[in-house]
Amino acid sequence: MSADELKAKIRDVPDWPEKGVIFRDIMPLLADHEALNETIDHIAAWAKPKKPDIVVGGEARGFFIGSAVAYSLGCGFVPARRPGKLPLATIGAEYALEYGTNALELQADAFEGGSRVLIHDDVLATGGTSKAMAGLVEQLGGDVVGMAFIIELDFLNGREQISDYDVFSLIHY
């Protein structure tokens, strides 16, 4: 399936989570086995030459494809969770969204220093979430080898926030 065919599987939800925002819902894409497989294959094909040891996926939709990409690449998966969701010691970062703020945490022992890390999330919007995840990975001594997204909202210029990293987005709005 082409990127345009995959894009056709994404549903627009107007005025969510607040008025004026159009939420790009990937759930119909995930529910279609062919679209799901193609999405994983496209991202894994881009990431494979980077030889990641770990995929870090952002809560919550970054878990779905991120863990499948990790499986496809033969590497581990680490979730970046909302505060208070992980046991043991964590490190955290707060970041700005296009409509508010949020925070993510990684377990302090999530991976070994020097690990090659691919960051995955469903959407690249303002870049705040991805930049925060990269900061957490680097704080733990990881090397961010790339960032992969299903969707990029080009009009929000999030790529500028993460211009120091190699970025791949499958679908653009």
Image (cartoon, rainbow, N blue to C red):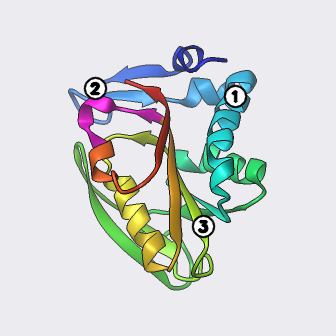
Q: Which mark is residue 38?
A: 1
Disc 1: CA contacts within 10 A as few (<14), some (14-19) or many (>=20): some
User: Mark 2 highlights which residue?
Assistant: 15
Residue 74 rendering spot, x and y as whole percentages: 78, 57
At horizontal 33% and vertical 40% (from top left) the residue drawn is 125
Give the residues in magenta: 151-158
- Quick check: 158 above or below 71? above
Residue 69 rendering spot, x and y as whole percentages: 68, 47
Whether the magenta-drawn stretch holds residue 3 is answered as no
Residue type at mark 2 is Asp
Mark 1 and mark 3 in contact? Answer it, CB < 8 Å.
Answer: no
Q: Which mark is residue 116?
A: 3
Discs 1/3, front: 3
Per the image, label 2 sits on a secondary structure element best described as loop
Q: In the image shown, does 111 or 49 lie closer to the viewer?
A: 49
C-alpha gap between disc 2 and disc 3? 38 Å
Residue type at mark 3 is Arg
Q: Earlier in the sequence, mark 2 or mark 1?
A: 2
Residue 99 rendering spot, x and y as whole percentages: 22, 43
Q: In the image shown, does 167 or 65 lie closer to the viewer?
A: 167
Mark 2 and mark 1 in contact? Answer it, CB < 8 Å.
Answer: no
Whether the magenta-drawn stretch holds residue 152 is answered as yes
C-alpha gap between disc 1 and disc 3? 24 Å
Describe residue 170's horizontal placement relative to residue 33 as left or right.
Answer: left
Per the image, label 1 sits on a secondary structure element best described as helix
